[in-house]
Every structure is written in C-alpha cells, then in structure tokens.
Amino acid sequence: MSLLKITKLGAALLASIVLPFAVSAQQPQSQQGSAQPATQPAPAQQPPPAEKAAVAPNRNAPMESHIGKYSGHSAAGRQLYFRYCWGCHGFRGDGNGENAPYLNILPRNFVAATFKCRSTPTGTLPLDQDLYNSLERGLNNSNMPSWITLTSQNRADLIAFIKTFSPRWQTEKAGDPINVPAEPALTLQSIKHGQELFQKLECWKCHGQEGRGDGPSASTLTDSNDQPIRPYNFTTGSRFKCGVTNRDLYKIFLTGVDGTPMPSFGDVVKPEEAWDLVHYLRTLQVNKKSPELALWMSTSEGAAIVSAQKIRGTPTGAGINQ
Amino acid sequence: MRYKQIITAAFLLTGVAAMSFAGPAKPAGGTVSGKVTYEGTPAKQKPIDMSKEPSCAKQYTTPTTTETVVTGPGNSLADVVVYVSAGAPDEPPPSQAVTFDQKGCRYIPHVLAFQTNQELKVLNDDQTSHNIHPLAKINHEWNKSQPPGTPPLSEKFPQPEFISVKCNVHPWMHGNFAVLKNSHYSVSSREDGSFTLPNLPAGKYTVTAWHESYGTQTQDVTISGSETKSVNFVFKAKPY
C-alpha cells in the first residue's frame, strides 16, 4: 500500500521533470467523465482554485472573534467545538458530521462560509456578532439549538474557531452591515402599503397569499445543498429564522438568507418601504399578539382577513400548524 | 492519501508552469477554429410547463423546452464553451459589460461566458419578479431579487468558475456562467456548432471544451505565426 504510493509519487515527480520536454503537440489528451459540474476542466494541470485555496492559507492559523467586550480565541474554541459541535458540523467543519444524514436541514458547512443570518449584504461574510447571535438564539425550524447555556466567553471562542475552517476568513473582511434606519411609527397606511408590496414583490409566490409557506413555487424549492426546503410559514409562531424582532425581520428581508432560495431585496426596496412590509408581515402572524396585528384587526377589512386566516388550512394540510 | 494527491498535482503543476513560460510570445495573430459535434443520441429535451407564470406562458405558442443539450443540423452541439485553459496569460477584464437577460422566464443566453472581474449586467424583461441565484462554489454565492422594472443588476466574479444559475421562483429557469481567466473563449453557435478563437500569439495552448451535461474535453494546439488551426470536438451524447 504505502510502497505503491511512494512509487506513484516518484512517478509523478519524474513526470513533472520529463513532461515539459516530452509532451507532443496536437494530441487529444483526455475525455473526462461528465457528471461532475466541472469547475476546472483540466484538473491535472490546473487544480481548481478552491483546492488551491484550501491548501495555501495556514489551516492552523489562530483566529479571533470580537463581540462587544468579549474576545474569542480559536485555541479555546477548539476544545468546545470537539465537545459540542462536531457531532453535526463534522470533524472538518464541512457540515458532514455523524448526525448529518439524519437532519433534514443539513448542518452548516463552515468550509463554504455561506451563512444564513447576517446583517451584511448577500454574498459577504457575516459579522462576528451575527454568528454569535445565531449561536445564542439557535436557528428556528432547524436542528440547531440555542447554546445560551454556554458562557458568553465560550460562544465567542467557538465563533473564533469556526472561522478557522474557511480561508475566506483570512483573505477577506466581513461585509459592511446594512443600514437599518429607525423604525417609523406604526400606522394603518404603513400596513396597507406593506400589503401592496407583498403582492408587488411577489412574496406570495413562495410564502403564499396568507403567508403559510404554501405558494405556487413552494413545493419546488431546494437549498444550496440540493435539499428540499420550505418557505417560512408566518402563521405558525413568532420566531423567524434569524431572530424575533422587527429589526431582525427587516434584516432577513434586505440581506436575504444565503444558501437558500430567499433572495436579498436590498437593491430593489427603499428603507421606508421595507419597514412597511415588516409591519404587514407581522399581521400574518395571526397567533401572536403584536401591535401590528391589533391595529390591523381594529379595521373591519383586517379583522375579516385575520379571522379567515385563523381557521383556514389548505386541502393538503400544509397550512395547518406544523 | 489526499495530501499526497495534492502534492502530486503540485509537482505536475510546476512542470506545466515551466512549460508555459518557455514558449515565446510573439504578437502575431493565429486562430483556432472548428466545430463541436456529438455522436450518439442526446436526451430529448422536456417541454416546460409555465402555467404557474401566465405572463410568461402566453409568450409561447408551443411550450418551450429545457436547454441542457442544444443541438443543431449535422449533429452540431451548441452552447459549448471553448476556451484556452493553459498557455495564455491571465488578462485584465475588458471595460464593456456582458448582458444576461431574463425574458419569457428563460435566460438569454443560456450559456454566458465572460472574464473574471468583467461587469455582468442582469436584466429583467419580464412582468414578474425573478431572483438571480448563481450557485457559486468558488466565488461567493449570492441571491438577489429583481422585480419587474428595476434597473439592471451589476455584478462581478473574481475567480474562474463554471457557475450554474437558477431562479428559485421559476424552477425551470436554468442557465450557466463561464467565468474565464482570459479573452480567448468562444461559445459554439446554435446554427452549426462552430467556434473561433482569434488573435492567439504564437505558442503552445491547451484548448478546453466544456458542456454543461457532457463535461469537458481538452486538446493541445501549437500556433506559429498567423495560421488558422482547425480543432474539432466530438462529445458522446447520452440518451438520459
């Protein structure tokens, strides 16, 4: 076995010396298998940049995180990771842990460094604080629990450690957080405008007219791991994927949820319009008492809509509390 | 095991690097041109049901089909990206942008090749919202909504990569970006599968052909002076 490897290595070494002189022109070289997405078509000659990147930055380089008054260190986080996290997120942080096959939203792949909950624009790295918040809060509708039982220092250390899995954390900075203006006063006009936006931006295509996550495209959606994924059902509760406050909802909407079908609306919606939509979305949460819902139900139009939403399910049962 | 593979690859790479630097680059213009064809029976393309999006469905009298394999007369194979994968230096991006249009709930063109850091403009010519979701693995994955009537999105990809693009709202919409390191590329035509790579200085090149369903093929070409070298690619079609 090892002898064979050494022979192979030797042959390759020899080839690398001889090859430049020996290659003859105009011969079809290879006809590779095609099932792969073929990121870089001539692998022997040009390893794909991802492979290069995975080797080049020092994998053991210590990382830090800074969350408020806490500074996390990867060396301390390592111990914690291999105690609490690796069962799902895997030995290499690639989301391929022992439990992963049993989970229907796959654990986050820290090597890809694509994160759902960010206050930064789509396609950019999140702030340390964003990761810290996810760890503290857990991710609703997934198997990621809240880790509020750990100390703040522990969580900061863990954030530092998961940043060692992707070279992106060494080569680039986190994105600039989006500007979230102060929430304007809640008015009926604002809710109604939000309702119009819900139609205009075609949120209902996935989330459904009543926000039950049963729109016409809902059944076809897959995440970036090619796993089926459901759009958020607003009627089930009060927690969103990335938080519970209006501000959290605003951020989800404008930054998108990377790695899922939920796009960013940051380029196409004005900040004040976004707040109107937030106010309207709150009224879809018919089982949660909120100022938005109370105001909406004080109108005859709103009251009729809400009472209808409370009792109606879809024939498939998709709208009934899951 | 894996590390050893990487080491082996690194050794090979050193060899190739030495090879490519050895070739003198004269400012003469050779050309590589040819045709891409297939042999065998390609998969029959499926009709797309756009009934969930009436504003798009009404634009077609007969249902449009998927485009995972696009063929032309004489067994020609279209939408194959033919490019110089080795031998040519990396080039800075040209100043003009390339355009990727969403029209009739399809991507036009289906395969769009451009350079790293070149400006990509994404247009929405439909009466419906689309979300542009390039499923990049090497570049950063992003996902942006584009309602009707919004200005074009302007984007760049810094790393070479073949990226599958989709719209989650309209699951039949599927396209490809080919982000390449230099300007020597061509996408085989839908008329006859032909391609041309002009303005190649004398030297030794590896030309690669990439097809989204059939994978890649490579051929080595040596250009001396202003000759035109003919290079043809034949892909084995799969009936499924």
Image (cartoon, rainbow, N blue to C red):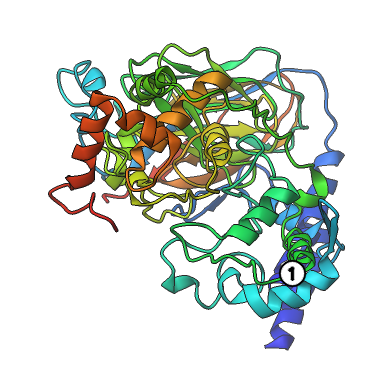
Front-most of A237 and A34? A237
Residue B109's x, y, as percent? 43, 23
Q: Chain of mark 1?
A: A
Residue B11 lies in quadrant: bottom right
Seen at 67% across and 43% down, the residue is A25
Residue A291's x, y, as percent? 44, 35
At label 1, which amino acid type do we have? Thr
Residue ID for mark 1? A151
Q: Residue furthest left?
A: A315
Classify residue A56 as left or right of residue B204.
right
Seen at 70% across and 13% down, the residue is B95
Front-most of A174 and A4? A174
Front-most of B170 and A14? B170
Residue B70 sits above or below residue A45 on the image: above
Seen at 71% across and 17% down, the residue is B29
Residue B170 sits above or below residue B217 on the image: above
Res A255 visible: yes
Classify residue A88 as left or right of residue A103.
right
